[in-house]
Amino acid sequence: MELNKHADLVTAFTGAFEEATGHHAAAELKTEVPFDQPGGQAHLDVLLRVQSPTGVLKIAAQTLGTGYPRDIRQAVWVLQQYQRAQPDKEYVPVVIARYLSPGARTALREQGIGYYDGGGNLYLRYGTSLIDIERPPQKSPPRNLMSIFTGAREQVVHCLLQATRGEKARWFAGAEIAAQAQTSSFTVSQTLREIEQLEWVESKGAGPNLRRRLIRPGQLLDAWADAWRARKVQSTSWFLFTARPQLLPLAISEKLDKSGLSGWALTGAAAGNALAPLLTSVQTADLIVPLGATSQYADALGLKPASSGFNVTLHERGGAAALFHETHPPEFPTTFASPYIQYLDLLDGRGRNKELAAHLRETVLKI
């Protein structure tokens, strides 16, 4: 531990203890306290002896900068090992951190470990005494959420949501997500670690037995939606004549089937309304096509460029948008983008798309 980094927190902890108990907390303080444990020698960050209303209180503490559930595991392990190594077993274990998330504080309580954080939250149980002070929520440390929704990481996010679709908090292995996301186990591990720190995913086990489950799909989807709206995409507008505009998606599907082109999928209002009927009719079509393939698809469909009055939009995409395409014969025999991609595309502010997005989320995604 770099004690100088967290010395102010130790001072703040003793001050909070004084305020809560009314007793002067002039303390004997030791740092980097070595002790023996089964795997060799370990070190306790801080050892404190403070005066409490019931006498001298021995506190064994580990310090952290930021503490999410995953971050506190090592600190908890050290505290537990230190307690086991002491013959008198009188030491009260405490985690002192600059920031502790609500989930981390709950986990510490459940394991009988006290805590103090920079927001003034203090929980300490010793003998028959209990200090339990909860302050208004701290603003979480800023995190670059956008990095989760780029490249192969976005594929992991998509797979994570897809793996939970229609199920309640199913446990899964990272290898399962890696196979479905068509990416490396390393990318999966890094992405899931960041999502877990946000407390949207929880885990159990370790190593080959590590399993995770998505517990807040709505928050993950909302964050993805924010990132989706902020990005720049390669989209072009076109016009395709059809005698029956309401059957435009079917006309496109028939042409593409004859062309032999693959990797495309219908998205937007036409797809969303077919999957979760709400609108009377949709006379436009949004089509996802492979990267660099716009001209090829425009030629195959006989499209004409149109800056206004267009009824077809081609979106060049790969990555997450290319995963989990679906078909829904016989009612609507064409290829659809994943319902999650459809939902994101419906957040474009056009017409009644926002209303259709909410309906799709409620009836199909059920988030």
Image: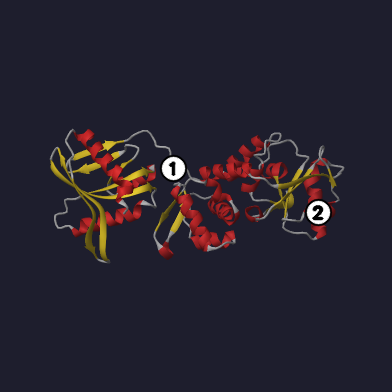
In front of the other: 57 or 246: 57
Taking the view exactly as shown, the residue that stands out farthest to the bottom is 39
Where does the image place residue 42, in percent across and percent down from the top left? 26, 61
- Residue 244 location, quadrant: top right
Q: Which residue is mark 1?
A: 141
Where does the image place residue 190, in percent across and percent down from the top left? 49, 57
In front of the other: 31 or 366: 31
Residue depicted at x 55% and y 42%: 222
In the rendered view, tell whether residue 33 sits above or below residue 24: below
Q: Are the residues flagged by discs 1 and 2 in contact, CB closer than 8 Å?
A: no
Whether residue 123 appears in this view of the structure is: no
Q: Residues within 10 Å of mark 1 (few under 14, many from 20)?
A: few
Answer left or right for 234 relative to 202. right
Q: Residues within 10 Å of mark 2 (few under 14, many from 20)?
A: few
Q: Amino acid at mark 2?
A: Ser
Q: Which residue is mark 2?
A: 295
Dot label at residue 37: none
Front disc: 1 or 2: 1
Residue depicted at x 55% and y 63%: 184
User: In the structure shown, which secondary structural element does the residue marked by tag 2 occupy?
Assistant: helix
Q: Quadrant of the C terminus?
A: top right
Where does the image place residue 276, in percent across and percent down from the top left? 66, 42
Residue depicted at x 62% and y 44%: 228
Dot 1 or dot 2: first in sequence order is 1
For the image shown, how many numbered marks are present on the structure?
A: 2
Answer left or right for 36 relative to 340. left
Q: Quadrant of the N terminus?
A: bottom left
In the rendered view, tell whether residue 308 sits above or below residue 173: above
Q: Amino acid at mark 1?
A: Pro
